[in-house]
Image (tube, helix red, strand yellow):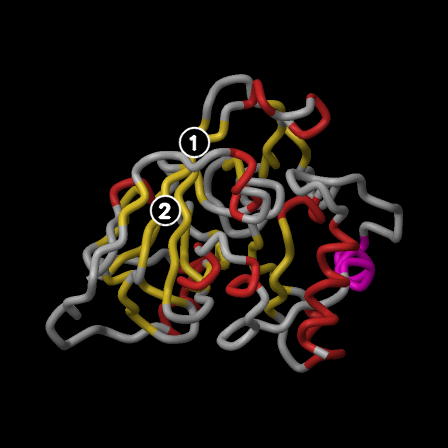
Amino acid sequence: MLDIASSVNLFAARSCSFDGVKKQIETHSYDKALPWATMARLRETGLLSDIQVATQNGWRPAGSLIAGDMVLTFDHGAQPLCAVQTVEIDPRILPDRKRHLMHVPAGTIGNPLDVQILPMQEVVVELDEAEERYGDPFVPVPAYVLDGYKGIHKARFDSTITVIMLAFEREEIVLSSGGVLALSVTEAALSPVATALSESEGTYPRLPAAELRRLLGIGSRPLPPAFAESSIDDTYAAIEARLA
């Protein structure tokens, strides 16, 4: 059984043991990076391949996971991966202003060591005011919005990075980097078909970017685009319209 540190006991409490046989499902593999032009949505999220993820069999690098592996989730216990997509990001094809990851100092959002996260990868942050206002202290926040929060800052990268996208039947929150709660995507989100990306069933609710910045105490200053061509505000406006 996975030994989870005391700092993430709540994660353990909300998880449960898996006492059945590993579900046999079709394996989806995406070993080759797709053309960058088709990755406008997919390139924004994912975990670096060496990031450790909590599974039924202990901590494993994200890059070693395959469809069917049982991954521990924050709300639904051990769940099978429906698909795993590997994407290589070459910084040479990015505009200079977008050639960065978010550097998260140790101890900031549950990480025992320094960690780097893609700008639009959502992580779950616990905020007392969010519980008072919305009844739930756990808030999904794109890492880019955390710029300036407890020392989190942009960090340039100059060599190709490998990003792993973990997909479940519905959105799930997984434990990574020893304590970071990271949001995963649905299997439908791995499809390049635009209609598949518009589905909101099985997704967590999001707060507007301006409200996230206020809750975090960062202020209402405008943020330039992250990896996406659109701004974070535009991204959230689209999500809000979909969920309205």
Residue 57 at x, y percent in the picture:
19, 56
Which disc is residue 88 wearing? Answer: 1
Q: Amino acid at mark 1?
A: Glu
Q: CA distance from mark 2 to mark 1?
A: 10 Å
**Disc 1, SS:** strand
Residue 66 at x, y percent in the picture:
24, 50
In the picture, measured across the screen, residue 170 lies left or right of residue 36, that is left
Q: Amino acid at mark 2?
A: Gln
| Residue 62 location, quadrant | top left
What residue sits 68% from the left and 72% below the top?
Answer: 242
Residue 7 at x, y percent in the picture:
45, 58
In the picture, measured across the screen, residue 215 lies left or right of residue 100, that is right
Residue 202 at x, y percent in the picture:
49, 75
Which disc is residue 9 wearing? Answer: none
What residue sits 71% from the left and 79% below the top?
Answer: 134
In depth, the one of 63 and 244 nearer the eye is: 244
Q: Is residue 49 magenta?
A: no
What residue sits 73% from the left and 60% below the top?
Answer: 236
* Segment tinted magenta in the rendering: 209-217
In depth, the one of 154 and 171 nearer the eye is: 171
Q: Is residue 215 magenta?
A: yes
In the picture, measured across the screen, residue 71 lies left or right of residue 231, that is left
Which disc is residue 85 wearing? Answer: 2
